[in-house]
Amino acid sequence: MAQEEAGCRGFSEGPLDPDMRSPRPQTVQLADQGSCLAWPLTSSRHGLTVMSDARRLPLLMNPPRTPSLSSSELQEKAATLLGVDRTLFVPTNTMANLISVMCHCQRRGSQLLLGQESHLHVYEQGGVAQIAGVHSHPLPDLPHGTLDLLELERMVTRGLGSPYHPVCELICLENTHSSSGGRVLPIDYLRQVRLLAQSCGVRVHLDGARLMNAAVALHVPPASIVEHCDSVSLCFSKGLGAPVGALVGGPKDFIEGAWRLRKALGGGMRQAGVLAAAALVGLADVEEVLLRDHQNARRFAQGLQELASPICSVDLAAVETNMVMVTVDGLPPQELCWRLQAVSADEVAQTGRAVRVLLFPWTGRSVRAVWHRDVSARDTELALRKWGKPGAPPVSGTGTGTGRHGCR
């Protein structure tokens, strides 16, 4: 039987075929592909109905210059949630970050300071340079995802009054910090960065793709984090579970400039209302969903530590939100990913089910597991059981494997 596509639903479940020869895999998706809210969104499950009929279309589809009611509602709710004047709905968080940098750094050759492992620096194709003409200067990330304040101050002040150095106009922080395994930036650290920036006439942008995870982990309103920044981005298609969408938040004049840049970058959408409706659903139960994700990630990390695997280890102190970084020794991470996806006849015979676990090979010595609304506590236990079965290859075998690729 065909497996359900894991790109949308993180866990698929079905009975084994009667002859046990063609099991339908149960897939636990711990690769960060984003979860999807099921369509149509119904009031019984999600508290909102989205229907493409004549009555609903005027609410969901408008020309880009005229926000739909759904996108306007989303932007207003998000502005209140984040404690900013206004927000602007955009297709992706990469676009949200690029727009923010372009709004802050309007002089070509302006300098942007950020972490060398930050998403904006590593995974957004250098858009701030190739599109905005902004010079990025990466600084070493500390284990917690922070930047050294003394080094940050040195770089901020170096260009002041100098005809040789680029002038720093913006500091970008990432919260939670993806490459550090979802670590949360402390409020006091954010306050110190803001004070430093203000003293030098520099602004602070927060890449808050997973801002809501940080707020839940710190037990504070998101506005308590955002108040230490001049602008913020927020992604709806990660832990919040919407199929697409992000936003930019900041002062009124900042968002007016962001609107023009969104149009120039091709981000104005007639279908924005349909997408905004799903984002509203993601916000509706955000605390409950993200807290469950954090608990499941913590349970997984504890369980993995209890397995005492000879090739896999995890630092429990570093598990703060919905991510677990697993250090791998003696086996290529890509090979470990493939083994956890593979289903053997022995496994089916022993357990009566076929389970596939999807992880992401993060570095040459680690894999990353990410939780979202489609991965339940039961899925987490299935993943641990798959990892720890005496006959399963991931933790007890060494071997060379097949070298297959394609881990998601």
Image (spheres, rainbow, N blue to C red):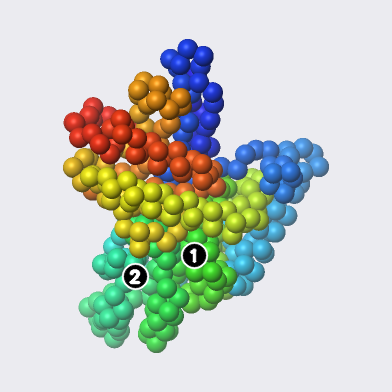
Q: Position of residue 25 (x, y in %)?
A: 46, 27
Question: In this image, 338 relative to 248: left or right?
Answer: left
Toward the top, the furthest residue is: 19
Q: Nearer the viewer, residue 99 or 18?
A: 18
Q: Residue at x 44, y 52 (%)?
A: 299
**Residue type for callout 1:** Ala
Disc 2 is placed on an element classified as loop
Q: Position of residue 129 (x, y in %)?
A: 34, 60
Q: Are marks 2 and 1 in contact (CB under 8 Å)?
A: no
Question: In this image, 86 relative to 21: left or right?
Answer: right
Q: Residue at x 26, y 42 (%)?
A: 333
Q: Residue at x 47, y 12 (%)?
A: 19
Task: Tally the numbered discs.
Answer: 2
Q: Quadrant of residue 405?
A: top left
Which residue was labeled with disc 1? Answer: 217
- Tell us which disc is closer to us: 2 or 1: 1
Disc 1 is placed on an element classified as helix
Whether residue 301 is visible, yes or no, is yes
Q: Position of residue 79 (x, y in %)?
A: 62, 67
- Residue 155 position (above or below residue 367): below
Question: Does label 2 or label 1 sit earlier along the sequence?
Answer: 2
Q: Residue at x 64, y 69 (%)?
A: 80
Q: Nearer the viewer, residue 292 or 3?
A: 292
- Mark 1, other Cα within 10 Å: few <14 / some 14–19 / many ≥20: some
**Residue type for callout 2:** Thr
Q: Which mark is residue 146?
A: 2
Q: Quadrant of the C terminus?
A: top left
Q: Nearer the viewer, residue 100 or 10?
A: 10
Question: In this image, 300 relative to 284: left or right?
Answer: left
Whether residue 177 is visible, yes or no, is no
Q: Position of residue 393 (x, y in %)?
A: 28, 32
